[in-house]
Image: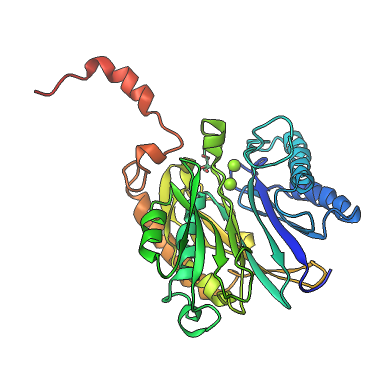
Amino acid sequence: MAVGEKITVSVIKADIGGWPGHSSVHPALMEKAKEILAAAKEEGILTDFYVTHCGDDLQLVMTHKKGVDSSEIHGLAWKAFEEGTKVAKELGLYGAGQDLLKDAFSGNIRGMGPGIAEMEITLRKSEPIVTFHMDKTEPGAFNLPIFRMFADPFNTAGLVIDPNMHMGFRFEVWDILEHKRVFLSTPEELYDLLALIGAKSRYVIKRVFPKEGHKIDKNEPVAVISTEKLYQIAGEYVGKDDPVAIVRAQSGLPALGEVLEPFAFPHLVSGWMRGSHNGPIMPVPLRHSNPTRFDGPPRVVALGWQINSEGKLIGPVDLFDDPAFEWARQKALEIADYMRRHGPFEPHRLPLEDMEYTTLPHVLEKLKDRFKSVE
Ligand code: F6R
Ligand code: MG
Ligand code: MG
């Protein structure tokens, strides 16, 4: 393997049991996953891997040469989650196996519960990437920061002053209700893009691509976000679809600091308590990724890596473990307080159609005979 060869980066995550409640992952689950991935690396299936967690989600970061949607890689992740679930059950962890919605693996992990972000890339001379891991929120939480990184000149100076990225980028946006997708180019279609992705519970950015004329091939993604919607898959609420993303950086792409800059503003996302509240997303180091207050506030962790010419993951650097994000954390806490004081009222509590728990049908049923027409 060398520069110019293809490598696939896969981040696959699942909540297979919380410790305690929905807050964190027990180290024994991570140990089990490491054991399974280490054996796969030994066999040559994986080039490299790293096991971590964000809140109650077990996170597998892997490099390999099998391409995206590989049944071998997905099967491996599924095995790690299944074996981890056994450990979670032994330990009596909370919601053991929560995100494993199907009994048997059938070739592709998509639609089975876990979240997946994968990209096959041609290794550049130097390949800096950031993996983002969020807890207590949904894929649409990435819309604003990914937009800022790749399309907002007030965030990314390179869009204005680097000739290698001045032409802009192409966004692949999914309508997760209708299961359709559309490609939009920036800066030309900036307003159309915003018209869609501002509705973040429905339209989500799935990938970003370079345009014709960029140093990177226009068919090779430079960012990818997991877009699984657990409650849709299962038809009822089974847990929040906490998302992950992979972003490539530097040299004609947003610089590392431009990739991180959007998180200096703790924007409001859906999720938090019972997947039914709006709250600020707080950028935190890994050791602070365990949601506590009101099961939150929602968290985001950023791990920095260099992929070397052999496809090895050199890292991670815990990028939000930095006083530069202290103000964002303070602001997030201030906003959390402000939002919390609304209690069960919107817009802290989500509108009915976006809630993942609702007793409203029961309340309406109980009251149905007492509702009278208003003349
Ligand atoms: C949100 C989340 C938690 C749970 C809450 C209630 O994504 O995971 O906020 O929804 O702790 O959990 P249960 O219903 O399992 O008691
Ligand atoms: Mg959980
Ligand atoms: Mg979670």
View extreme (front): residue: 212
The answer to which quarter of the image holds residue 369 is top left
Question: How is colour applied across the structure in the image?
Answer: rainbow
View extreme (left): residue: 375
As rendered, which of 144 and 25 lies closer to the eye?
144
In the picture, the quarter occupied by the C terminus is: top left
Q: Specify whether 327 is left or right of 45.
A: left
Q: Specify whether 195 is left or right of 150.
A: left
Give the residue at x 48% y 85%: 161
Give the residue at x 64% y 69%: 217
260 lies above or below 290? below
Q: Specify whether 261 is left or right of 30.
A: left
Task: Pinpoint residue 187: horizontal percent, then vertical percent.
Answer: 42, 70
The answer to whether residue 297 of the structure is visible from this angle is no
View extreme (top): residue: 369
375 lies above or below 150? above
Task: Pinpoint residue 74: horizontal percent, then vertical percent.
Answer: 74, 45
Task: Pinpoint residue 271: horizontal percent, then vertical percent.
Answer: 47, 47
108 lies above or below 134? above
As rendered, which of 166 and 269 lies closer to the eye?
166
Give the residue at x 82% y 51%: 37
Task: Pinpoint residue 135: horizontal percent, then vertical percent.
Answer: 56, 51
As rendered, which of 278 and 195 lies closer to the eye?
195
In the picture, the quarter occupied by the N terminus is: bottom right
Tally of numbered discs:
0
The answer to whether residue 116 of the structure is visible from this angle is yes
